[in-house]
Image (cartoon, rainbow, N blue to C red):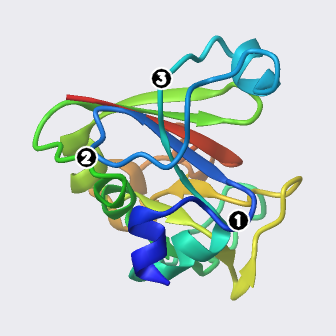
Amino acid sequence: MLARAATGPAAGPALLTVTGAIGKRNRGPFDPALDQMMHKQKLAFTDAFTFDFAALSALPAVTIHPTLEYDGKVHALKGPLLMDVVKAAGAKPEAGSLTLRAVDGFAVDMSVQAARRQRFIVATHLDGKPMALGSLGPLWAVIDADRIADLANKPVNERFGQCPWALYHIDVRA
């Protein structure tokens, strides 16, 4: 399964599209007629790498346990490290930046160093269950804010401003 994730097109619906400074491609160019959400969010690209749920699940996963702002409770979030996802798309970013985009258009720019230092994950599971579209998923770029000193000292509702839920696009810039 990992070989397919790294080389071939997604077998299931693409959940995550990675564009920019990547070395692998399994999707053709942006189509303004058929890529309506991307068109409305003013995206454009000549090629990309996409992941379906199986491809993301085939990557090594980590589990974090942050207190979430929505209910003030600790939850288990599981998924691959964001930098492992970017690397699986063929990016080799030692420096540079990422833009993480959610389906509602919310976008976060961050340095590769920040993504690595804060150990962002692309969460696919919440409390052992796949996340659904319409909740926080199906993908959520998230951190274990309780274990990051600069964030743990903030009120819980101020810890996740860099964490787009319903993540669907990552742009990699070298």
Using a 10 Å C-alpha cutoff, classify the residue at mark 2 as few (fewer than 14 neighbours), some (14 to 19) or many (20 or more): many
Element at label 1: loop
Q: Which residue is mark 2?
A: 91
Check the image and name the residue furthest to the right.
134
Q: Which residue is mark 1?
A: 72
Q: Is residue 104 above or below residue 140?
A: above
Query: Where does the image place residue 28, in percent across and percent down from the top left?
Result: 55, 35
Can see residue 61?
yes
Element at label 2: loop
Element at label 3: loop
Task: State the separation of the CA atoms marked 3 and 1.
Answer: 42 Å
Using a 10 Å C-alpha cutoff, classify the residue at mark 1 as few (fewer than 14 neighbours), some (14 to 19) or many (20 or more): few
Quadrant in the picture for residue 143: bottom left
Identify the amino acid type marked 1: Gly
Q: Which residue is mark 3?
A: 46
Asked if marks 3 and 2 touch (Cβ < 8 Å), the reply is no
Q: Residue at x 70, y 24 (%)?
A: 38
Query: Where does the image place residue 30, in percent across and percent down from the top left?
Result: 62, 24
